[in-house]
Image (tube, rainbow, N blue to C red):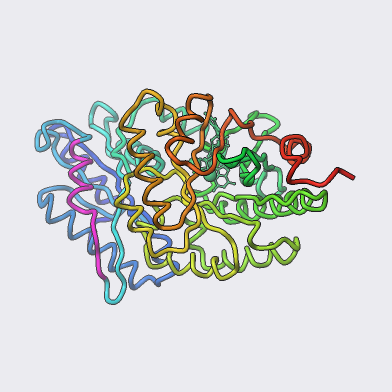
Amino acid sequence: TGLANLRQVGHEIDTVLQRAPVIVAAITVDGFREVNDTLGHLIGDELLSEVAERLQRAFPDAVLGRIGGGRFAIAVPADQVAGDAALFGLRLRTSVEGGLQIGAVGTHVRLSVGCVKGPDHGADAATLLRRAETAMYSARGAQGGPVLWEPAYEVQGQRRMAVVMALRDAVATGAIGVAFQPKIRASDGSVAGVEALARWTHPALGGISPDEFIPLAEASGLIGILTNSILRQSLTACRGWQRRGGRVGVAVNVSASTILDPDFVGEVRRALVETGLEAELLTLELTESVVLAEPEQAAERMSELRRLGVRLSIDDFGTGYSSLTYLKGLPIHEVKIDRGFVTHLVRDAADQAVVRAVVDIAHTLGMSVVAEGLESTEQKQLLERLGVDELQGFLVARPMPALKMASWLRGEARHLMSAPD
Ligand code: C2E
Ligand code: CA
Ligand code: CA
């Protein structure tokens, strides 16, 4: 890219900082690692130099440097952006994000951006850069941000480190377990399947939510092993219920980086063979972002999985039906409407309209629709009226261990199960 490195950028930022307040942003190119790994670093390099060029074009006077991997730092005097760090972050995203063609490869550039203000958030470049990066990492879990650094991140940073270290051990020793939550058919209340949800209780840190450790597992390269472990535990449990006469499928959540991993399909095949479970009893839940960010690779991987015979579901759905139309050509069986829409459904006409539209299009495309996060009977009645096929949420049952799931299935779904042995 011909850009300054971390040390040089730091030096230049310190110089600006001596004269005037400065806004520093740390940027990461989402999916850069995957592009590099799967398409080769020639394409990876091209991607980075295109990003660098777009940044330079939008902010010709800024201090700009590459601070490692797919990461950049960019700084401007605060008055150039009205002292507004978030505005600067947004302008960075709008001027860089969008389609990009490299040779035969079409991709979509997306950034995660973290910002800091100097000297408010730090008196020297090293502190500002470090804090901008911290904010950037949290932007990755927040639709790209921009996220503005705040003092609380310092404490969170220490927690993150502790959790990542513990996570490494937990993944290696198989200490992360699974809970299962059933999903029922709206038509007759019968069990349509169960979803596997990762569960982790650390001896010193206590119970840690997947919303906290899954993003950390993704960021620290542990998600592949973790997904494998969850997959095997889920298939084994499912096989166990089947032996007792309950034919109920299991759904496993798959992160974006995992679905793009070239080894993943093979792992799924092996897990199915080793547990002796029919492929059609396994559903993989993916989020739509991966399909939009890496359409070709994702489509190819999905077709391979489809050929294995597993079902595919789009999780956390809800950013409008333009993307549903986009999913048209893909082998998707099911769409899960994001919990966010269900929460306020009863009072919010707009949410109702979205659910109705999603149901409409999904049915036209031959997909079934699941609503999750169902907590009240009012929501249930409304969702049924809106034509949703399947329901999942605390109203039906909370996530529970495999053994408890087995007895729940016997009790709740007697018509699906033969008598227990
Ligand atoms: P998700 O896939 O959307 O999973 C549904 C989440 O909603 C679960 O949270 C579940 O416990 C919760 N939930 C279910 N019914 C209700 C309800 O009625 N009300 C409310 N308020 N919540 C409900 P959980 O287990 O904390 O998981 C959070 C997220 O972490 C999951 O969201 C999923 O994105 C991720 N995750 C969990 N396990 C795995 C895993 O094995 N692999 C991957 N990649 N991600 C996982
Ligand atoms: Ca899910
Ligand atoms: Ca979900």
Tell me where residue 149 appears, x and y as whole percent: 33, 32
How many badges with numbers are in the image? 0
Q: Is 245 or 117 nearer to us in this picture?
A: 245
Question: Looking at the image, which residue is at 42% across and 33% down?
Answer: 340
Tell me where residue 49 appears, x and y as whole percent: 24, 64
- Rendered view: 353 above or below 5: above
Identity of the residue furthest to the right in this view: 421
Question: Looking at the image, which residue is at 31% across and 40% down?
Answer: 145
* Residue 134 lies in the magenta-colored region: no
- Rendered view: 347 above or below 13: above
Q: Quadrant of residue 328?
A: bottom left
* Residue 93 lies in the magenta-colored region: yes
Tell me where residue 417 appears, x and y as whole percent: 77, 46
**Left or right: where does residue 141 sit relative to residue 60?**
right
Q: Is 401 or 23 nearer to us in this picture?
A: 401
Q: Main secondary structure of the magenta part?
A: helix
Quadrant holding the C terminus: top right
Tell me where residue 206 appears, x and y as whole percent: 65, 28
Q: Is 247 or 146 nearer to us in this picture?
A: 247
Question: Looking at the image, which residue is at 61% across and 69% down?
Answer: 266
Magenta-colored span: 87-101
Quadrant holding the N terminus: bottom left
